[in-house]
Image (tube, rainbow, N blue to C red):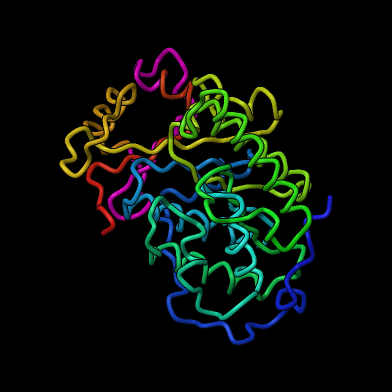
Amino acid sequence: MDAGPLPAAAQQGGGRQGIVLIELALPRLAPEARDCCGQLWRDARVLAWGEGIHLRAEYLDARNAVLSQLMQSGEPMVLALETSFARSRLADAYVLGDGPDDPDDEVIRSVWSWSARPLAKNAAMLRFVRAHNSTRAPRDRVRIYGLEMYAGAGVDPNSLQHRADRQHARRLAALLTTHLTGGGDHRELAGRDGAQFVTLMEVFERHEGTRVLLFEQTGHLDRRVPGSLAAQLVAGGGVPVRTVGAFWSAEDPTVRFPLGDYELLSRWLDAHPERLLPVVEGGGLLDLAGAGTTGSPAVLREAASAFDAVLHVPRTTPIR
């Protein structure tokens, strides 16, 4: 499939030509969690890393730390995000070398994270990936794709540079139109996750054998939920997937969104902080390998049926 040529600035390879070195550092993954993340990555074609509540510093820091850790291997990879496919083409072009070294607001917003404002943590991630890519051969570079069929208002599929992008953007627009005219809502799992699955299959076809770090809100990553992206990958894609659900505390005064079915797990994690491996400041990781056995607490056995690990942030920090 024609994924489109690399931008001219990305075809040259080698050397950090003109790369801005300010703000290129990302948070580092705590040593205690590196082995767990490494094992999840070794076993997966897709490592689906969860976001709990949107616009919380700890979840974006954890994403950036995991991305930084995985990129150290130097292997090609795709970063798939919960943003519009059409808008994400700006971010992909930027990390391949297009445009000024400092990303403009529109490029930063194209990786979304559910804010109309350009978030500093997303800007830092983009700069870091661009600097990394500037030292790599084209086949070994990190690529960025959005999975959503919506949140792309104002982006005409025909305005996209590459034929394959135009074709896929039109396909997503048709899926959204069909879903809405049938009485559906664009936020419904049946529509959103179905379109996300279609886009991830497109990514696999374009980048055969390349592994994917997927950053999505936890509900999309629960294998137990019929029609969720994770369930579709397991059932319909035949793809080795490892999932990390992300949670917060029911006692977090900054969060109004209910934990729902995850409240018992969250309260257990609150009560057992010693079981958590530090990931980034304020967040801990629990590896659920082996938690599905009869000797484990029932709440962990249930969690292990949904996820391979969980990230818990007892007190989240809103991004203003």
Quarter of the image holding residue 260? top left
Vertically, is 12 above or below 4?
Answer: below
Residue placed most toward the observer, 249 or 94: 94
Tell me: 33 left or right of 73.
Answer: left
* Residue in the picture at 63% in, 39% down: 44
Q: In this view, does 32 lie to the left or right of 268?
A: right
Give the residue furthest to the bottom.
18
Q: Is residue 286 magenta?
A: yes
Relative to 302, residue 229 above or below: below
Question: In this view of the protein, which residue sits in the foreground, 194 or 210?
Answer: 194
Q: Quadrant of the C terminus?
A: bottom left
The outermost residue toward the front is: 181
Image position, residue 148 (x, y; %): 56, 43
- Would residue 99 be found to the left or right of residue 268 on screen? right
Image location of residue 182, percent across then percent down: 57, 23
Task: Specify the segment rendered in magenta.
Answer: 276-301
Q: State the image coordinates of residue 120 (x, y, percent, origin top left).
A: 38, 67
Q: Nearer the viewer, residue 38 or 128?
A: 128
Corner quadrant of residue 31: bottom left
Q: Residue at x 54, y 19 (%)?
A: 226
Residue closer to the observer: 289 or 118: 118
Task: Identify whether 286 is placed above or below 64.
Answer: above
